[in-house]
Image: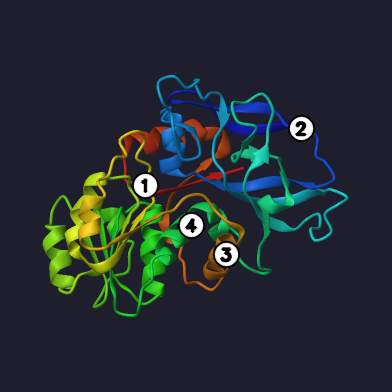
Amino acid sequence: MKAQAVVFTARRTVEFAEVTCPEPGPDEAVVRITHSWISNGTEGSYLRGERLAGDTALRPDDPDPFPIVAGYQKIGVVEQVGDRIDDLEVGEIVFAAMGRVDNMFESRGGHVSPSIGTRDQIWKLPPGVDPLPFSGLVLTQVGYNCGVRAPVEVGDGAIVFGDGMVGHWAAQTLAWRGARVLLVGRHDDRLAKFPTGRRHRAINARKEDWIQAARDLFPGGAAVSVDTVGSISAVEQSMPLLRRYGHIVSAGFYGTEDRLGLQPPRNGELSIDLVSGWSQDRMDHTLALIAAGQLQTLPLITHRFPAHCAADAWDLIQTRDEPVLGVILDW
């Protein structure tokens, strides 16, 4: 079967190309894509040749990880259903994660239409809702995972590093759980998207002293700090700001520069939670929170490109010639 896909053919090289996919089997469904959501951080590190797979950093002796179909999240319409699937119907609008592809470094990818995937890669969306807010479901789930990992009581303090999409959804999740959130970033336009007020605050670390702000907001120490940007320095700086038995949640990609000393967190008996990937239950919970309006995704979308202009989208994401955050590809 032929399909169209966003392909990283080499480092910093993006093409919209025809690809070959295996014929669908009885346990698979075919989804014609309407919209896919770019994951700027994860896909960007693949595009730069920093990852071999998932959260595995590329090392000097590893093979060159190209070509690869980029991405892992999209929405679309069910076009064909395998004989062994009894709970999907042709015409349903669904979220789809990875689809199978041939002749690539990895045998699956996200930005591909039509997408051929097993049932466990497909989620039915609630009837009568706008499907677009669900098009970044995997990445939203990463933020949700960051926000639910540590035990938090109502009124506890939480520090979130990163004003990217994962940082926003982690902050939203912690706020939903009742925590008071300090979102630390470096872009005024992004920070403005986080609702603040008496309970929450957003700080541009380039302009303000976020450490003093954390001390002022949480004089007894914060319960949790969440790193979504892959900064060992941020993790280390947050340790003295946490109360005893506090939690560090690490969701950033550190590549090969991932060394963190264990004695400093031991002094405060801190726990370190390492989050990665997605799971069925977390995806289900995230979908429900989006449907209920507890997790907001549409406000984070800043740009939409036709899918065949994916190279232009990536040029903007990498150069940041104008403020950019969530980028949707229209198929």
Which residue is depicted at the point 81% across and 58% down?
89
Picture coordinates of residue 57 (x, y %)?
42, 33
Please state which of residues 321 and 110 is positioned toward the viewer in this rendering: 110
Q: Tag 3 or tag 4, which sits nearer the N-term? A: 4
The three-letter amino acid code for the residue at tag 4 is: Thr
Find out whether the residues at labels 4 and 1 contact each other: C-beta distance under 8 Å.
no
Please state which of residues 254 and 291 is positioned toward the viewer in this rendering: 254
Q: Tag 1 or tag 4, which sits nearer the N-term? A: 4
Badge 2: few (under 14), some or many (20 or more) residues near its Cα, within 10 Å?
few
The three-letter amino acid code for the residue at tag 1 is: Gly
The residue at which mark 1 appears reads as 252
From where the camera sits, is residue 204 visible?
no
Q: CA distance from mark 2 to mark 4?
A: 29 Å
Find out whether the residues at labels 2 and 3 contact each other: C-beta distance under 8 Å.
no
The residue at which mark 4 appears reads as 140
Q: Give me the disc on residue 287.
A: 3
- Image quadrant holding the N terminus, namely top right
Q: Tag 3 or tag 2, which sits nearer the N-term? A: 2
The three-letter amino acid code for the residue at tag 2 is: Pro
Q: Tag 4 or tag 2, which sits nearer the N-term? A: 2
Which residue is depicted at the point 37% across and 59% down?
168
Q: State the image quarter where residue 199 is shown.
A: bottom left
In front: mark 4 or mark 1? 1
The residue at which mark 2 appears reads as 22
Find out whether the residues at labels 3 and 1 contact each other: C-beta distance under 8 Å.
no
